[in-house]
Amino acid sequence: MPFLATTGSLSLGEACWHAIVLGIVQGLTEFLPISSTAHLKVVPVLLGWGDPGIALTAVIQLGSIVAVVAFFRRDLMAVIAGIGRAFRHGQWRDPSARLGVAIALGTVPILLGGLAVKKFIPDYDNSPLRSLTSIAVVSILMALLLGLAEVVGRRRRVLEDVLPRDGVLVGVAQLLAIVPGVSRSGSTLTASLFDGWQRPAAARFSFLLGIPAITLAGIVELKDAVSAPSNGGWIPTLLGVVVAAIVSWLAIAWLLRFLQHNSTWVFVGYRLLFGLAILIWFRGLDAPLPHS
């Protein structure tokens, strides 16, 4: 399994160092509403490594999936049990069953969107949507939307209030994360806040909804990552996945505690500064992110 196939010839030590850095970036940003995809593209460019590419970043995300599945294993078991009871006894009003249905429905939009990108935009890796300017502008727009959601959201609903239509609504928001800079967790958290969810419940639903989406993305791109040429070998890739899993676990635990008593304004401010910084530092660079 290769690592950083787009960065040219790397020694094992260099590839492992790149893997550790990208694993940390992935773990810190996947579940915070600041866009892991954007950071996994911008940080390597700032460090002079070039764009690691869609396939590699998708595989690194598998570490985050391991973390979120392990962290929410009890919630997932409850959802599976609830769905089972619903099929056997028709108890579809059970909160766990409704949550399972919402997750299933919420996965459909990004699944269809991902298939559409694969079919109709075969060179998406070099799309203008992946340019630094696009990432900056999208980050700023999503920051403004998150801020608006903080202002108008009623924050009354909890996870037990989930309905199938919540899955559709938040799933459509999740679809926007196909565009780098949107942030899957950011778009779903924003949609949930607009829909009246309490912050911790909105984050929890965002995490659970992301499990199928991120897993499918990683599996689909795994073949491309494995077949790509590289001198790094499979050890750096595995290292990146492990680091991403550990850091993701810590980020999930921290965010859930943080949102118990704090708003998302700190992320609004960060995304604004992040977008503005990119526009200033990479002024005039409108092409897709460069490969080394």
Image (tube, grey):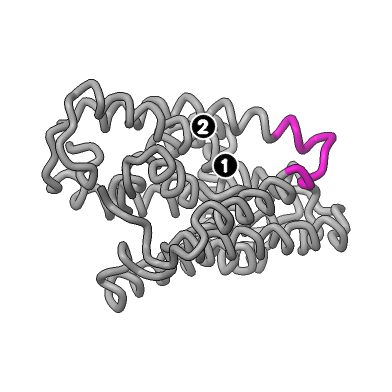
The location of residue 197, given as percent across then percent down, is: 78, 54
- Label 1: few (<14), some or many (≥20) within 10 Å? many
Residue 173 higher or lower than 74, as above or below = below
Question: What residue appears at the point 63 percent right and 55 percent down from the top-left corner?
Answer: 276
For the residue carrying disc 2, how many other residues have a C-alpha within 10 Å: few (<14), some (14-19), or many (20+)?
Answer: many
Q: Which mark is residue 88?
A: none
Residue 12 is covered by the magenta coloring: no
- The residue positioned 84% from the left and 60% from the top of the image is 153
**Percent from the top left, x then y, of residue 86?**
57, 54
Distance, label 1 to label 2, CA atoms, is 7 Å
Question: For numbered disc 1, what is the local secondary structure?
Answer: loop
Residue 263 sits inside the magenta stretch? yes
In which quadrant of the rendered image does the N terminus lie? top left
**Residue drawn where x is 14% and y is 39% of the image:** 230
Give how far across and how far down residue 249 sits, in percent.
53, 28
User: Mark 2 belongs to which amino acid?
Assistant: Ser
* Residue wearing tag 1: 31
Query: Could you tell me if the residues under marks 1 and 2 are in contact, i.e. CB atoms within 8 Å?
Result: yes
Could you tell me how many numbered marks the image carries?
2
| Residue, far bottom | 120
Q: Amino acid at mark 1?
A: Phe
Q: Does residue 63 lie above or below 98 as drawn?
A: above
Query: Secondary structure beneath disc 2?
Result: helix
Magenta region: 256-266
Q: Which residue is mark 2?
A: 248
Pointer 1 or 2: first along the chain? 1
Q: Main secondary structure of the magenta part?
A: helix
